[in-house]
Amino acid sequence: MGTKTVNSGEQIDRQSRILEAALDLLSRHGISGVSMRAVAREAGVALGLVNYYYDDKTSLIRAALHQVDEQDLQLVAPDPSLTPDEQLRKALRRVAGAELLTTRYLSLRLHLWALAQADEGYAEINAAAFDRYLDGVAALVSNAKPELSWEECRERAADIVVIQNGMWLTSLLGVDNASIQRSIARTEEIAFAPSRRSTSGDAALREL
Amino acid sequence: MGTKTVNSGEQIDRQSRILEAALDLLSRHGISGVSMRAVAREAGVALGLVNYYYDDKTSLIRAALHQVDEQDLQLVAPDPSLTPDEQLRKALRRVAGAELLTTRYLSLRLHLWALAQADEGYAEINAAAFDRYLDGVAALVSNAKPELSWEECRERAADIVVIQNGMWLTSLLGVDNASIQRSIARTEEIAFAPSRRSTSGDAALREL
DNA sequence: AAAAGTATTGAACACTCGTTCAACTTCCGT
DNA sequence: ACGGAAGTTGAACGAGTGTTCAATACTTTT
């Protein structure tokens, strides 16, 4: 029920297969590799069907962008089964997890950023998703350290995201894994740092 | 002398104008916006001339990639008129300077990364340039802190570059300038940190 | 069983693309 | 002043693009 009777194995839900094919092509060959014909071929579907489910090529790309954005947001979704501290720590460490640090995902993110930079329409979607992600990180920080003001949480979230984006990008360029691990530790330091200023050590942040 | 007699004002050196046009289009509209015709139009030149100076579209893009890579390398070029400390600090702060933090440059870098991710040939060029940049940063660190081993300098360089890439990328997404400034301070901390471990404070790096 | 609705196909259209090339202009050594 | 080299032009070609659409297959409703 729901989606057709079986035909052979599991080639149901062709709309998802089309979106999946688009994501795959985008991550492997960039936007130039995403033609309606290539998507159809990759999805094992006739050309016309791509335009049946997605009016435009633009709609198809928008759907891809939307899907990745949602996936990103779930990285910072609250998890009631953990303590606030654990939630925050787990979220921060997940960015170097096996699910995320794949070439496919990183490449996808990169191409979507580039796309958003080139096209006004995608840019708005992307900016909104980025803001929601920032809010998600800030909320996790706020839960783990309730004594902080919301503004300070947003500040820390911004600093954390800078490093996270750096990790995502740089791991595509082939930096060694040890550096990624140190960078993750750095995001944890930022998140869990004592209230206003750093410790008494000389590593304290100097306002410049 | 050298490059033609003047024709009207300064429309000499059409090859440079073509490359410039390609860079401009790439930064504004991404690789999809860089067609030979668009480049010719932007450079105020006939279509055929683009293929006269650059055999391929590939050669044109390679030239663009090469130019940006060289520009990046000069950011960490030694400057004999400064002390090692000043050289390092200046280089680290320059990544948030007005010359670099323009949409044009950042967008360009982003599209070139995306391009390198999609094409094997560009990837090699990009990886080599990235390595040279890493070496440049490590050399600056080594000069400023001669007591460090070369391996440790490379480590610090890698960590610094992660944050720098994060800044470049994130500033395109519209993070506030204050976060950029804090991130720069963070790269300076990494660069100038005491020899092996962090200070005695509880913000010391935990190996995880 | 007929009708209505949805899913799916591939040919066709009008464009744009990268590349080639014969023609033309401008320059410079002789 | 001539002739060859370098620079410059735009038309032409074939391949690939996004989109449309009439025709077909399959499902569900009547």
Image: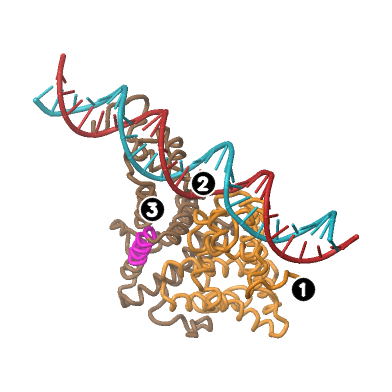
Chain colours: A orange, B brown, C cyan, D red
Q: Indicate whether residue A51 is drawn in magenta.
A: no
Q: Is residue A57 above or below residue A171?
A: above
Residue A116 location (% of width, % of height): 58, 54
Label 3 near label 1: C-beta < 8 Å?
Answer: no
Q: Residues within 10 Å of mark 2 (few under 14, many from 20)?
A: some
Amino acid, disc 1: Met
Label 1: few (<14), some (14–19) or many (≥20) C-alpha neighbours in 10 Å: few
- Number of the label disc, if any, that sits on residue B65: 3
Residue B104 seen in render = no
Cα gap from disc 1 to disc 3, whole angstroms: 53 Å
- Front residue (pair A147, B205): B205
B78, above or below B145, in the image: above
- Label 3 Cα neighbours within 10 Å, binned few <14 / some 14-19 / many ≥20: many
User: Which contiguous range is marked in magenta?
Assistant: B121-137
Marks 2 and 3, the one that precedes in the sequence: 2
The numbered disc on residue B28 is: 2
Marks 2 and 1 in Cβ contact (< 8 Å): no
| Helix, strand or loop under label 2 | helix
Mark carried by residue B42: none
At a point 35% along the width and 40% down the height, the residue shown is: B51
Q: Give the number of the disc on residue A1.
A: 1
Host chain of mark 1: A
